[in-house]
Amino acid sequence: MNEANLATPAAAANAEKVEAKIEVKLDAKQNLEVADDQVTVGQCFTDAPKMTMRNVNVFYDDKQAIHNVSIDIAQNEVIAMIGPSGCGKSTFLRSLNRMNDTVESCRVEGEICMDGEDLYAPKLDVVELRARVGMVFQKPNPFPKSIYDNVAYGPKIHGLADTRVDLDEIVENSLRRASLWDEVKERLHQSGTGLSGGQQQRLCIARAIAVSPEVILMDEPCSALDPIATAKIEELIEELSENFTIAIVTHSMQQAARVSHRTAYFHLGRLIEVNPTEQVFTMPEHELTEAYITGRFG
Amino acid sequence: MSKPLDNLGKIRKSLNRRNRSEQLFRWYGRIAIMIGLAAVLVLFTDIVSKGNGAFRITYLQLEVNYDQELIGVDNLADPRQLAQGDWQVILKQALRNQFPDVSGRGDKRRLNALVSNGAGFDLKDRLVANPLLLGETETVWVLADDDIDTYYKSWLDGEPYAARLTDKQVEWITQLHDQGKIRLQFNSNLFTRGDSREPEQAGIRGAVMGSLLTLILTLILSFPIGVAAAIYLEEFAPKNGWTDFIEVNINNLAAVPSIIFGLLGLAIFINFFHVPRSVPIVGGLVLTLMTLPTIIITSRAAIKSVPPSIREAALGMGASKYQMVLHHVLPLALPGMLTGAIIGMAQALGESAPLLMIGMVAFIVDIPGGFSDPATVLPVQIFLWADSPERAFIEKTSAAIMVLLSFLIVMNTTAVWLRKRLERRW
Ligand SMILES: Nc1ncnc2c1ncn2[C@@H]1O[C@H](COP(=O)(O)OP(=O)(O)OP(=O)(O)O)[C@@H](O)[C@H]1O
Ligand SMILES: [Mg+2]
């Protein structure tokens, strides 16, 4: 701030205070810096994992976004990933269904397996993988096609429905499970982009579950939604967890607390702590986790 | 406390200034548009005022006797007789009957010059269509010569131009006018005939067909190639030095003067591959080379404008890249691509320079019926007519320009309509 611009002594004093605050913050950050040999604390591994990640490193060109992450995701589990902005949650999530392949500069190292099968094996077909690991994005992104076509798209390209009747059934079921059916059944053939934000996001969820994936990845699915739509989607996640394994990135700790079984805390590209959600929010093991959930930074 | 109020004052002050600059800017815009509109208006009024005369042409009424002896025909089914018959002679006879006082070789020749050289063939066509007329007499309107046409129109307009007529001819025309035996009719020849040395018989059908054939070929070749190239470059090609190099060169090609493409076509298609000259095939190939960069650039822009979230959604659903492009990117980019293609076609339609290089400037009377028939195109036809010495070609030139412009307007309107329509789908 330029001194000459401060008209009154009071303003100058204010400015000093602000600067002091910033210093404190910087200090706190420095203290919370993670060491290079940081190991994840808590319960990273499970007995019967659906997905296993071992020593995963992700790079954008030379910049490393994920450092040495190892974690299991159990069958029918909802795992929440939290952490400050830019810590690599999306990057990690997107490496689970190889959406990072679309980013030219991105490189993934380490081992990511589903049911014991290496997802980065050269012979693995990403098309099949993405049919098995579905994704819901932060911003609702329905296709500019009808609601029906949005949901029917996956089954169509993967050849899941033999007849028109089958397809109708899949569409109806998916919309019902996404608790959108009652709202749209009268206008299945109108544009999906004409729905409200929350409806669009539920449409995207319906679209994702229409191909019956084994795992669903959700990247901040409620960040663009109002509390009511959010509540609906959270309810939905709970129901879906009966049939699917879900990994969800969220900025809302309440949301993580409400929907997930386990919570993983990321910090500057490192996985700091993984523990049952209840424990993470009541008795975090690591001081960084505690600092984050108590709102000292983020 | 005083500070917020002070700010408000400052904001208000700057508000005045901002509003003033906005008003000023609006006026700049309006003036710019008015200048543009005025230019278009001047152009159109000039062309229309010069060209609208060409849509009507002078006919003379004569009593024609289809005299077998004179023509030298007794069997109308024999093409050789038809081809060899002297059809003009019955017109001469009719004129002499109309003006029995005319004598002397010079006067008779000038009298014969009242009707078009080709008018006899029109009579032949009438006779072939209705063979019962052979040996009979009928009253017909026959095409006048272009000098008569020019004079009669200018005379009707009150500024007679008689430089190419003798006093006698002027007198005959006046007589015919007084008897109601000369009049202007719709000039259907303009739209049904090919080029001719005689202005009154010259039409733009040949050039329109030539343009059409050339454009069809251009569209068939350049749209798929351009779109495929754009899709490959945008969606599949790795981003490296090579693709940058290609991109720079495509942009360079778009800026290359069109005549260079003509030279290229001459060297490659005609001299190397021995494609015949003056035919729509070679014209289409050359115009394809010329419009490809435009189509590639507009198609790439259209593809780029498809939001990345749609691509992610498709890939996230397990669509292959090809399916993503085919199902989602292409439908969304299509309006932009079509607009680009139509603009490219409009450019190609108006292009003459490269076609001059590959011989499409030849004088061609026959209407081309296929891609390998010698042809010319509208802009080249305009160039040819504008270059002709006959005064009657002046209005023909303007008429051809009007036709070309209306094609362009139709194409551009289609582009706008298509874009609106396709975009409105969702
Ligand atoms: N396409 C990319 N190219 C280069 N760097 C990237 C790219 N995407 C992400 N990054 C970098 O990787 C790091 C992790 O980003 P990521 O998007 O995974 O963070 P995040 O935890 O999801 O953040 P947020 O909560 O804000 O979404 C950041 O430092 C970011 O700048
Ligand atoms: Mg993110």
Image: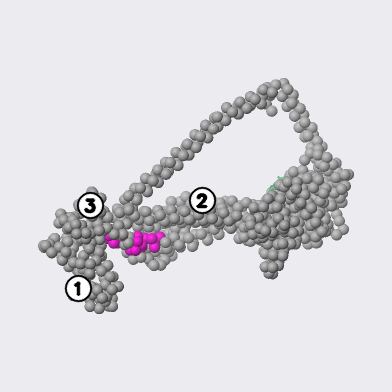
Quarter of the rendering containing residue B195: bottom left
Question: Dot 1: within a 10 Å radius of its alpha carbon, few (fewer than 14), some, or many (20 or more) residues?
Answer: some
Quadrant occupied by the N terminus of chain A: top right
Residue B331, given in percent of the width and then of the height, sits at 58, 58
> Is residue B219 found left or right of B71 in the rendered image?
right
The residue lying toward the viewer, choosing from A7 and A1, is A7
Give the structural element (helix, strand or loop) at label 2.
Answer: helix
Residue of label 2: B251
Residue A31, given in percent of the width and then of the height, sits at 82, 37
**Residues in magenta?**
B191-211
* Residue B422 seen from this side: yes
> Is residue A80 found left or right of B299 in the rendered image?
right
Which residue shows up at 80% across the image and 50% down it?
Answer: A80
The residue lying toward the viewer, choosing from B148 and A278, is B148
Same subunit, labels 2 and 1: the answer reads: yes
Give the structural element (helix, strand or loop) at label 3.
Answer: helix
Q: CA distance from mark 3 to mark 1?
A: 34 Å
Give the structural element (helix, strand or loop) at label 1.
Answer: loop
| Ligand 1 closer than 8 Å to label 2 CB | no
Quarter of the rendering containing residue B188: bottom left
Chain letter for the residue marked with disc 3 in the picture: B
Of callouts 2 and 3, the N-terminal one? 3
Residue A187, given in percent of the width and then of the height, sits at 66, 58
* Residue A132 seen from this side: no
Residue of label 1: B67
Query: Given contact means CB atoms under 8 Å apart, are the residues at marks 3 and 1 in contact?
Result: no
Kind of residue sitting beneath label 1: Asp
Residue of label 3: B155
Q: CA distance from mark 2 to mark 3?
A: 55 Å
